[in-house]
Image (tube, rainbow, N blue to C red):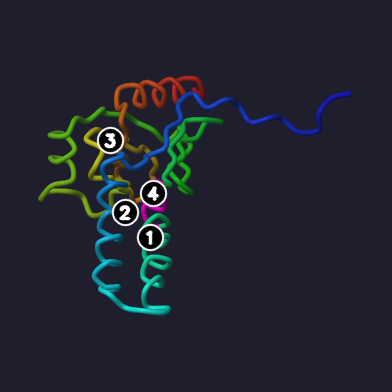
Amino acid sequence: MSPSHTAPSVPAYAERLRLPWWLWLAGLATAALLAVELWMGATGVRAWLPFVVLLPAAAAGLAWLGRIRIAVADSEFRVDDARLPVRFVADVVALDAEGRREVLGVGADPLAFVVQRPWISGAVQVVLDDPDDPTPFWVVSTRHPVELAEALLAARDATR
């Protein structure tokens, strides 16, 4: 018996852009401090409502900030819900913090696709070769820019 569909391939690269522990600590501490300020000796519902609302809301917001997944799989570069077929990749440049600052600085191209997380210093710049797309390049934060660049170039070369 043969399968009627092909199984997705194992990603050549996969990463989730999670928040570091210290941002979780700072966010939850700020929410707790705000809840204490709103409580300030109140009785009844006002005593516990700030804690019940603000702490889960802060946790949900922090989880939402760390939701972005990036992957190179099935001849695609995936960044959250954006998909880029690797056949349109002309070049990939691994960027350190200074390189990312230069690419996203004053002279940045407004048509570029950017997924940037300030708590992650590295990034890749993916230069595109698609005449039908006005986007000149993608800039995506990553903790492992060299590995992601290598995975993208290998996937591109495998499709050619």
Q: CA distance from mark 3 to mark 2?
A: 33 Å
Residue at left offset 14%, top offset 41%: 101
Q: CA distance from mark 4 to mark 3?
A: 16 Å
Amino acid at the residue labelled 2: Leu
Residue at left offset 22%, top offset 30%: 95
- Quick check: 130 left or right of 29? right
The answer to which of marks 1 and 4 sits earlier in the sequence is 1
> Percent from the top left, x then y, of residue 124?
29, 33
Given residues 151 and 39, the one toward you in this image is 39
The answer to which of marks 4 and 2 sits earlier in the sequence is 2
> Percent from the top left, x then y, of residue 7?
69, 30
* Mark whose residue sits in front, 4 or 3: 3
Question: To which residue does mark 1 refer?
Answer: 55
Question: Contact (CB < 8 A) between labels 2 and 1?
Answer: yes
Question: Contact (CB < 8 A) between labels 3 and 1?
Answer: no
The segment highlighted magenta reads: 61-66
Amino acid at the residue labelled 3: Gln
Given residues 115 and 111, the one toward you in this image is 115
The answer to which of marks 3 and 1 sits earlier in the sequence is 1
